[in-house]
């Protein structure tokens, strides 16, 4: 059983705190994605788990055993670094094989293992090449193959698809989960690509400034982001964020868009008169007839076809931008006046001052939640 526990980890470089009292549990066989902007501390955290660097405070437990003082080569960890870290004097084959050679596998087992993972990553045709003859994408896949070939119980992958072309990146998003599941490894995967995070993670841990700000399933992170910064990072097109001051009506709290009331199901009087930010995903908005209940009048400014979907920019009566996303081929106005219907059950409300998600006071089962 290979679990990972980080307990109150602190890492400083001079006066800068890079990891700030960070604690994290990763279950045996789990794929956890570390997601966040550049400089959040993701790579530092991986290197600390691998034993390349030491924490200033806190403990690292692997499989329940304290590894904080254990050297990197004795931790049983496989890692693909963002900067490749390939041996320049070795061929791609020998770079990949180094993990097996160090463990004294037979020549036959080494050859079989290298060829298997190289075919999966589509680099079997460059195994005789040295790193200087490889493209960045091939170097990245060689580093990934080296991490995978030994089937380590704990696998640390630092943005391994970053330099891979779009087609192969899409293919690998489909292939990697199957490969990692077959190996049964516990995996920590770093990325700045939210689609990759959603596709590869059993859970996602969102990092900002050396802290974990939210941990949850991909659906949890997307549907109920804990704060505005997280909401902005997930989604394409980005979430609509509108400043509102909720009011009280006969049917409960509501926000006003273009003079039309948008109900906020489940919220009570505690939000009335409070400065808030209303978050609405573009796919939670549809065009509607003017006569529909709760139809919100807007003006269509522009329409952008994006292969599988069409994104429309609209303006409310106050000139606030609202993006609408609909499947390609779905009819909708390309210009001029229009009306929108919003799925109020999918609307999010954030405290404007703190940026934190505000949760309804009523359980979801008691909310009416009609579209408005």
Image: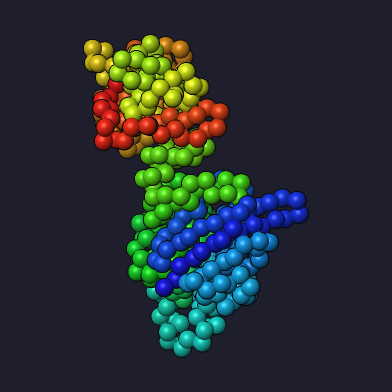
Picture quarter with the C terminus: top left
Q: Where 276 falls versus 147 (above or below)?
A: above
Q: Is residue 329 left or right of residue 110?
A: left
Question: Is 218 rendered above or below residue 59?
Answer: above
| Residue placed most toward the observer, 104 or 57 | 57
Residue 116, quarter of picture: bottom left
Question: In the displayed structure, does residue 208 sit left or right of residue 204?
Answer: right
Residue visible at 26% across and 36% down in the picture:
365
Displayed quadrant of residue 84:
bottom right
Residue 294 horizontal side relative to residue 274, left or right? left
Give the residue at x 37% y 20%.
253
Q: Is residue 367 visible?
A: yes
Image coords of residue 294 (percent x, y) = 29, 16
Number of numbered tags placed on the structure image: 0
Residue 175 sits above or below residue 67 on the image: above
**Residue 193: horizontal and vertical position, in percent?**
48, 47
For the point 70% across and 55% down, the residue is 12
Say above or below: 232 vs 136: above
**Front residue (pair 123, 235):** 235
Q: Quadrant of the N terminus?
A: bottom left
Image spot of residue 329 (x, y percent): 26, 31
Where does residue 96 sit, x and y in percent of width and height? 51, 74
Q: Quadrant of residue 250 in the image?
A: top left
Query: Which residue does the image show at 48% across and 69% down from the upper left?
Result: 154
- Is residue 40 in view from this perspective? no
Q: How is the image coloured?
A: rainbow
Which of 231/370 is in front? Answer: 370
């Amino acid at each position: 059983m290979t679990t990972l526990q980080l307990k109150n980890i602190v890492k400083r470089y001079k006066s800068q705190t890079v990891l700030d009292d960070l604690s994290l549990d990763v279950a045996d066989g789990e794929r956890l994605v570390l997601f966040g902007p550049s400089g959040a501390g993701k790579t530092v955290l991986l290197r600390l788990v691998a034993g390349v660097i030491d924490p200033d405070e806190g403990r690292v437990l692997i499989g329940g055993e304290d590894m904080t003082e254990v050297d990197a080569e004795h931790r049983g960890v496989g890692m693909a670094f963002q900067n490749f870290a390939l041996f320049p004097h070795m061929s791609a084959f020998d770079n990949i094989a180094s993990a097996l050679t160090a463990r004294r596998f037979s020549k036959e087992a080494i050859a079989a293992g290298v060829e298997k993972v190289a075919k999966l990553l589509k680099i079997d045709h460059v195994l005789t090449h040295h790193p200087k003859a490889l493209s960045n994408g091939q170097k990245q896949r060689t580093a990934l193959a080296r991490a995978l070939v030994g089937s380590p119980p704990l696998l640390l992958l630092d943005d391994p698809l970053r330099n891979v072309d779009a087609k192969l990146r899409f293919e690998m998003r489909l292939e990697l989960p199957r490969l990692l599941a077959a190996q049964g490894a516990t995996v920590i995967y770093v990325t700045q690509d939210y689609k990759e995070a959603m596709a590869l993670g059993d859970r996602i841990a969102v990092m900002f400034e050396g802290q974990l700000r939210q941990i949850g399933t991909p659906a949890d992170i997307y549907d109920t982001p804990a704060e505005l910064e997280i909401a902005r990072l997930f989604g394409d097109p980005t979430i609509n964020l509108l400043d509102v001051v909720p009011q009280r009506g006969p049917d409960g709290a509501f926000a006003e868009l273009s003079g039309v009331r948008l109900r906020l199901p489940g919220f009570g009087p505690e939000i009335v008169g409070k400065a808030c930010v209303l978050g609405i995903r573009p796919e939670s908005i549809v065009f509607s007839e003017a006569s529909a209940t709760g139809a919100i009048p807007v003006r269509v400014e522009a329409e952008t076809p994006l292969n599988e979907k069409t994104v429309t920019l609209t303006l409310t009566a106050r000139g606030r931008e609202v993006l609408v996303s609909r499947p390609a081929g779905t009819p909708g106005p390309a210009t001029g006046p229009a009306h929108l219907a919003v799925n109020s059950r999918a609307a999010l409300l954030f405290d404007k001052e703190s940026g934190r998600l505000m949760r309804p006071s009523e359980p979801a089962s008691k909310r009416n939640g009609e579209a408005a």
